[in-house]
Amino acid sequence: MSLELKEISDFLKLHHPFDLLPDDVIEALPKRMTARYFRKGTKVLSPEQQCQHLHIIRTGGIETRDPDGQLLARLGEGECFGVRAMFRAGRAANNITTLEDSLVYLLPEKEFHNLAGKYPQFNYFFEQMGGARLRSGMQLLEKRDDDQLKLMSVRVSDLIARDLVSIDIGASILEAGKLMCRERVSCLLVTQGAGAGEVAGIMTDRDLRNRVVAEARSYDEPVSNIMTPNPTFVGPDDYAFDALLTMTRHNVRHLPVMKDGKPVGMITTNNLLARQSLSAVYMVGKIRKMDQPADMAKVIAQVPELLTNLIEAGATSRNAGHIVTTLSDAATARLLQLAEDKFGPPPVPYVWMAGGSQGRQDQTALSDQDNCLIIDDAYDPDQHGDYFKELSTFVCDGLNTVGYIYCPGDMMAKIDQWRQPVRVWQQYFNKWIEQPEPKALMLCSVWFDLRPIHGTRAIFDDLHRMIITKAKGNRIFLAYMVGNALTHHVPLGFFKNFVMIRGGDHDRTLDLKHNGVVPIVDLARIHALANGIDAVNTYDRLEAAKAFPSISTQGASDLLDAFEFISITRLKHQVRQIRRGDRPDNFLQPESLSAFERTHLKDAFSVIKNLQTALESAFGKSGT
Amino acid sequence: MGLLQKITDSDFYRQWVQRRATGPLRAYYDIPATHPDTLIRNIEFVALDLETTGLDPKKDEIVSIGFVIIRQLEVDFSSCEHLLVRPQKELSESSVIVHRIFDSDVEKAPDIEIALAHILPILAGRVLIAHHAPIELGFLGQACKRYFGAPLHIPTVDTLVLALRDLYRQGQPIKPGALKLESQRHIHNLPPYRVHNALSDAIAASGLFLAQIAKRDPKGELELRRVLR
């Protein structure tokens, strides 16, 4: 066989299932094939169209959608399409559109069946693809429907199944019972004032049992005697997952949904917990009941497995980060409760803050702790110093035992510097903002991403307002932040090739954290601080930034997509490592991705690069 | 387009030269050339590349010919061939470095007359595709004149010229190397080739041609005249 066609057979040999064919068979294949070229966006096949070739993608990528327009797959280099047609007498089953300019090799139907007849393993692959694999894919989709993924993507407003049933506060217990019976509800909202205006309380069938029957109360008493006043509520835009957490935390099964102070609906555990058990929520519930850090460690040790399940079930990185961070929050809050039990109630109010990735709610399988304590200005070091030192040391040590190792940069509440009253924190932030210096900028990535976890949240609110206002107007500070952000280069060379780490333990890899995730987190922080946005989560910051001129709406959207893609690539990489029993890290070998994914990764890096450049011209570099 | 080329590409010129053609070239001219008004998607093309001992058709010789046929805008790999050609003179060192074809390789190969007799029927009625066609036309034409009494007249698409038109249309400055086959393939997201010889370059040009047509003619309504050189 001539050398030139060897390029084609060599290509086939690299791709499954052609690699299963004997060498002489595969080398004879190119002579039986043809090649076609399709521009990006070309409709290559539509349902029922004649398709008498197996299509093998040489370069480029395609998207396959079922006749209803549902996305089935995106395929890249070395992958095949038109497979269903091979089993349907040459009639295509789905819509195929090119996502990029693509060169495609065509193997005639006859040759395909010839190979499939002779080589069972080859046949098996395509049979799976045509039929069984699609079915298992559908099962996966169905299964997804009732687990926590749905709760992560669904907002509370989507779960409000029916109109709210409410009763006036003056009604009797008997009237309430009759109404519940008639409306077939397990819960009533108790309102007062005209037009069911204001929520006074909530009454459930459990209240009828516990507070009426068990207490032998008269049915003529008003509902106000048995209702739960000022119930906990959620907003329509909250995630269903968070609503479920609120229920677990308060041990209730019903939550009113309030919008602008008005009740708009009610959700119940039945809405949420249809059939499935929710592992993350159960893990949180367990942690809340534990008294020993060593026990919590056993729960937190399951985080890699949880992450694996989430990613394999198709969770977004945003969902996964949110869920994993919820567990850290639960462990932190529980340790603080235990500390307060042990050392007594706090002598002055305080708030425990999480910084860094926990603050931003984007933790992954490996996390260290970044936290600090902000204490009310009534704090007197001589009088209260020991209490807070003991409390913080207990919690930081506890977190270390649980699995959140000590911060290598010592940014923890157990360090005296990071356990201070509001007035000292104000001085810190004043100094960082007004006299920016390199060391302070390093701290910024942790302390400008603070989120309250436990204690008196109002303490942080005032400080937060001050930080936001100060940072917004300070262009020198912002320019320093920009200069710092630009030190994180994306790993792309001049010709859009990957620039990989050379030598050492991570030879020929990309650092997805420092060269991918961190630059976007930095960009989002700057746009947030520059515009007075108080969000801390990177997605929320970028969403909010769209409304401001410092970044274009398109730029922010591109960056959001890039963030999701790089984060999910990083998580999938870590999941692969966890599956192999390796310790997860951030170092990815580009060869472990398909060509299609590599192209997307390059695109994502290009987006970062472009927006870094845009930022540089908008704010100027440090020192200028 | 130069006046001379206009003349040599014309039907009149074809009729004039074919009268003097002998042997396989006569048979070639008996089959009418593809009309420029034919739709591209209905035409059969031959993407062809030569390896030569130098750049001057009058002095230098062909050492290999590679080609592949395109039908209905599909590259048909079953049609591809790679012919070695035995030159009259010994191969010079400098040319061996370029094409890596040695005297021992071409010892038993047919000479150019036999090779031409083989490829002329394949070219007949089809349209030639080459990347920088003056080389292919020059060497094939010279050989035809020498052995079969007349030059070769064939409608030709030059992928380099199409690339050049694209760059002009985009108003881009033309960087050194931008028109090379490899660079052009890269632009169109076509895979790189590791091996370089007459056939792999012919296949490479065929892929580039498909990409250039896909860009110009997404609906398949373009006539040949729009892409002729």
Image (tube, coloured by chain):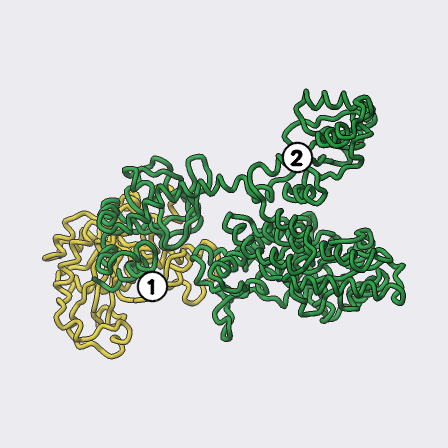
Chain colours: A green, B yellow
- Residue B150, quarter of picture: bottom left
Q: Is residue A195 above or below residue A37?
A: above
* Residue lying at the far bottom of the rendered structure: B93
Q: Nearer the viewer, residue A409 or A249?
A: A249
Q: Is residue A468 above or below residue A88?
A: below
- Residue A417, quarter of picture: bottom right
Query: Which amino acid, by three-letter code, is at mark 1?
Result: Tyr
The mark found on residue B81 in the picture is: none
User: Residue at coordinates 70% horizontally, 41% vertically from top-left?
Assistant: A251
Q: Is residue A469 above or below residue B34?
A: below
Q: Nearer the viewer, residue A6 or B209?
A: A6
Q: Is residue A90 above or below residue A103?
A: above
Coordinates of residue A502 in the picture (x, y in percent)? 50, 73
Q: Is residue A175 left or right of residue B157?
A: right
The mark found on residue B193 in the picture is: 1
Q: Nearer the viewer, residue A424 or A273?
A: A273
Name the subunit of mark 2: A
Name the subunit of mark 1: B
- Tag nearer the camera, 1 or 2: 2
User: Residue at coordinates 67% horizontally, 57% vertically from top-left?
Assistant: A358
Query: Which amino acid, by three-letter code, is at mark 2?
Result: Thr
User: Label 1 to label 2, Cα distance in Å?
Assistant: 63 Å
Same subunit, labels 1 and 2: the answer reads no
The mark found on residue A268 in the picture is: 2
